[in-house]
Image (tube, rainbow, N blue to C red):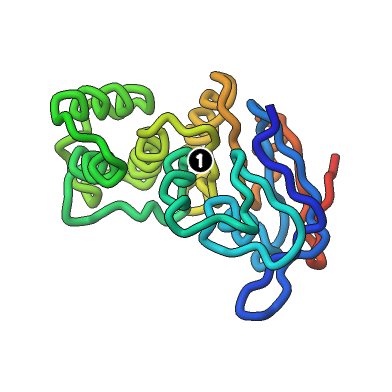
Amino acid sequence: MELINYKNVEIRQSEQTVLRNVNLSVQDGEMIYLLGKVGSGKSSLLRTFYAELPIYSGQASFLGYDLTAIRRRQIPYLRRRVGVVFQDFQLLTDRTVGENLMFVLRATGWKDKKVMRTHITDVLAQVGMSDKAYKMPYQLSGGEQQRIVIARALLNTPDIILADEPTGNLDAETGQEIMELLYGIRKAGMTVIMSTHNRLWTELYPGRKLLFAGGQVSECE
């Protein structure tokens, strides 16, 4: 099943063209790496997927939504189908891990507290963090925080995971643990799109590679 279809898309930020003539088709279950220098447009492309950055021109379909004509009221429904993993974690620092995840569930329409607590327990177990629900973010290592971020991304059983430099702030060993986790999610059948500077990951965990350079996106070996 096709999840993404971009044809001749132009993306602008602050009236400057970031990417042009983007043609991209993504199928369910793929692992895709976005490769390129800082400022080459990787994050900008990811942001268009969840409608944080508008499409300037071209045709853009994402999870069945026409991103060139999406209405503001539709955006929350689109975002519930997307799990986003940020490099800088973006956890609420004044709440425990469990409270961070509970906040997301409440914000996305969950009501039954017992069901919510059970679901949080299940998702934390999925990322190997079963015993961390009562910890504050500052009590966790960088790798542990990133696992919590992945758990947060999985809460609403998304169709796709978007990971923006998820290992960028981690040492090599911890980064590989996070890659193992993300690749395991992909092997379970979920699509993962990940921007990275680390080409080693593309060798250890094979997938499609898209190169960002000169305002263009191209497939690479």
Which quarter of the picture shows residue 111?
top left
Which residue is depicted at the point 24% across and 25% down?
121
User: The N terminus appears in which quarter of the rendering?
Assistant: top right
Q: Nearer the viewer, residue 147 or 162?
A: 162
Q: Which residue is mark 1?
A: 175
Q: Amino acid at mark 1?
A: Gly
Q: Nearer the viewer, residue 207 or 168?
A: 207
Q: Could you tell whether 166 is left or right of 59 in the image? A: left
Helix, strand, or loop for circle 1?
Answer: helix
Residue 96 in the image: state x and y as whole percent: 17, 44
Which residue is depicted at the point 66% across and 62% down?
55
Residue 159 in the image: state x and y as whole percent: 53, 32
Q: Could you tell whether 83 is left or right of 62 in the image? A: left
Q: Could you tell whether 192 is left or right of 108 in the image? A: right
Q: Residues within 10 Å of mark 1 (few under 14, many from 20)?
A: many
Residue 48 in the image: state x and y as whole percent: 60, 57
Q: Residue pushed farthest top?
A: 188
Q: How many marks?
A: 1
Which residue is depicted at the point 27% across and 40% down?
109
User: The C terminus appears in which quarter of the rendering?
Assistant: top right
Q: Nearer the viewer, residue 113 or 162?
A: 113
Q: Tell me if residue 214 comes above or below residue 197 in the rendering.
A: below
Q: Tell me if residue 59 comes above or below residue 192 in the rendering.
A: below
Residue 214 in the image: state x and y as whole percent: 82, 67
Q: Residue pushed farthest bottom?
A: 15
Which residue is depicted at the point 60% across and 31% down?
191
